[in-house]
């Protein structure tokens, strides 16, 4: 299995969420699919705090479609735990974008998950992969280099 | 609280599903929101086995939007249990449709849930409530009176 | 259908959440089951801000099991919308507890949902309905009468 | 990114499921986290059709805890599509187990997802990683070599 590198980007952002009861399973801990949804929340907040938002990208006529997902689970979160989602932009090209994530418990800093996702840009009108227009790319690049 | 009447419709249909691990919670049983999603599966199968399908209704330009939900939980389903969803058309008007449901365990017949949902028809183009065209209404009525 | 009364309790609490992409469906709005999970988040925060927490109730040996759910959907929330969940204690007895909810959009105050849930107390050791011990009941009552 | 090998195991099993409306998102297709839950359904059915079941493993005092997840998304499934989940045992050791998956549309065979998951065995009593007892290991091995 390939190594998931921790995000080296110093401009990563942190989002905090609380584990919902509905997100737990019969093992008494958060179900592993819940973490995948939390990653999405991390991406949403990363885009918002910088030059654009995912909603704005969709409004401009593009979807950001997930094509690859890697996740390593280190420890389990429980109901009502506060979880910190650290999200960084890992790579940006005109046709694709990657994010890296670290999740940990707020209370003791226990590492929960390390993950990476790859996405492509898709034109809503044609449902086909496409390049993002320069102005949107610039807004996204704004995340990495101030 | 109002009484949720059991579906009197003899033309109700039954769908069987198996409780997924992701649908359980830390109480060790299926989370109460999982049942709400199972109702949707019951509606889907009811429409399919008769004159139309929900996919066909959407393709014709209409959404069937849930406006009211009532559910009574009688017992808990567990991971890997087989659940029978009995779905009946409760009421049909040109602007609205209602369904009634009974869920029970396949193995011993233990009643799990009684529920009722109300929906309106919405035009996809305008996002506004609308009447369903006669041909679609007829297809839906076909569920009740053969 | 019975009327769902708006919570008269002046000691209701408000929780804000943001609609996740995973909570939307192919209609382009939040799926109706997502709201049911948001109610749970409202209950969690109501209990926390007062005399106890749901986690503490479980640690003391009790589950609070949902037995009835009523919800009226007034308008749809979309991805990234901020939703305010107003939660009030509706009724408290030694064996049961009810909550009432109003959900609205943060931005324009658009009403989204009115709901009510009924729950019973269940002993974790026996999985049977039970009375809550006086000290936990007192903590819960503390929500209603200061 | 590492290559996810297609399962070479000729004793892979196939499970069919139908995409639920609740599993779609505002892009009009199944949300990427839904596929992760379908993998779990594949594992459940793989174990059932052979020497044991996941429920039996839990009853014997063990959890099978996911520690790593890799998934490649090739195409999107839509509401009401029939999806075939092909699941194979990839590796079995006394302390760990891996599965490989291929998902495709039933209708045209369109490849949807390739994935692999790694799991460890955890004792329910201690919440610690453990070896599976020989009789359970033998039942699991029975999946690979008849």
Image (spheres, coloured by chain):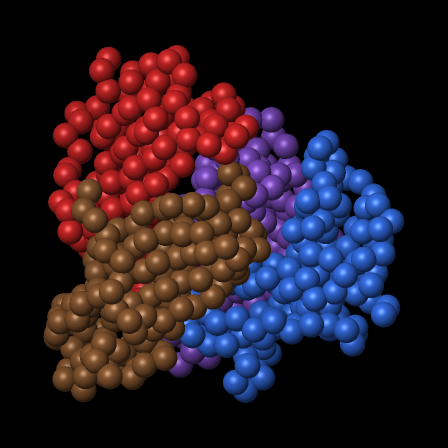
Chain colours: A blue, B red, C brown, D purple
Q: Horizontal and vertical percent for residue B67?
A: 34, 41
Q: Quadrant of residue A25?
A: bottom left
Q: Is residue D110 left or right of residue B144?
A: right
Residue shown at 29% from the left, 16% from the top: B142
- Front residue (pair C79, B109): C79
Q: Horizontal and vertical percent for residue D137?
A: 45, 63
Q: Horizontal and vertical percent for residue A123?
A: 74, 38
Q: Horizontal and vertical percent for residue B50?
A: 33, 20
Q: Is residue C15 left or right of residue C119?
A: right
Q: Is residue B102 visible?
A: yes
- Front residue (pair D59, D140): D59
Residue shown at 49% from the left, 60% from the top: C106
Q: Quadrant of the N terminus of chain C?
A: top left
Establish if C22 lies above or below C89: above
Q: Quadrant of residue A124?
A: top right
Establish if B28 lies above or below A54: below
Q: Is residue A72 left or right of residue C69?
A: right
Residue shown at 62% from the left, 39% from the top: D76
Q: Is residue B122 left or right of residue C146?
A: right
- Front residue (pair C8, A144): C8
Q: Is residue B77 visible?
A: no
- Front residue (pair C59, B140): B140
Q: Quadrant of the C terminus of chain C?
A: bottom left
Establish if B25 lies above or below B19: below
Residue shown at 30% from the left, 43% from the top: B68
């Amino acid at each position: 299995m390939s190594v998931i590198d921790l995000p080296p980007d110093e401009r990563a952002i942190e989002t905090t969420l609380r584990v919902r009861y509905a997100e737990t399973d019969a093992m008494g801990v958060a179900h592993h699919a819940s973490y995948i949804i939390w990653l999405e929340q991390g991406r949403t907040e990363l885009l918002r705090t910088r030059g654009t938002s995912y909603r704005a990208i969709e409004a401009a006529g593009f979807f950001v479609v997930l094509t690859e997902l890697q996740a390593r689970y280190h420890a389990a979160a429980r109901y009502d735990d506060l979880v910190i989602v650290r999200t960084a932009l890992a790579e940006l090209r005109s046709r694709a974008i990657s994010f890296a994530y670290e999740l940990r418990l707020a209370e003791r800093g226990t590492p929960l998950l390390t993950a990476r996702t790859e996405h492509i840009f898709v034109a809503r009108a044609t449902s086909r992969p496409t390049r993002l227009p320069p102005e949107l790319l610039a807004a996204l690049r704004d995340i990495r280099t101030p």
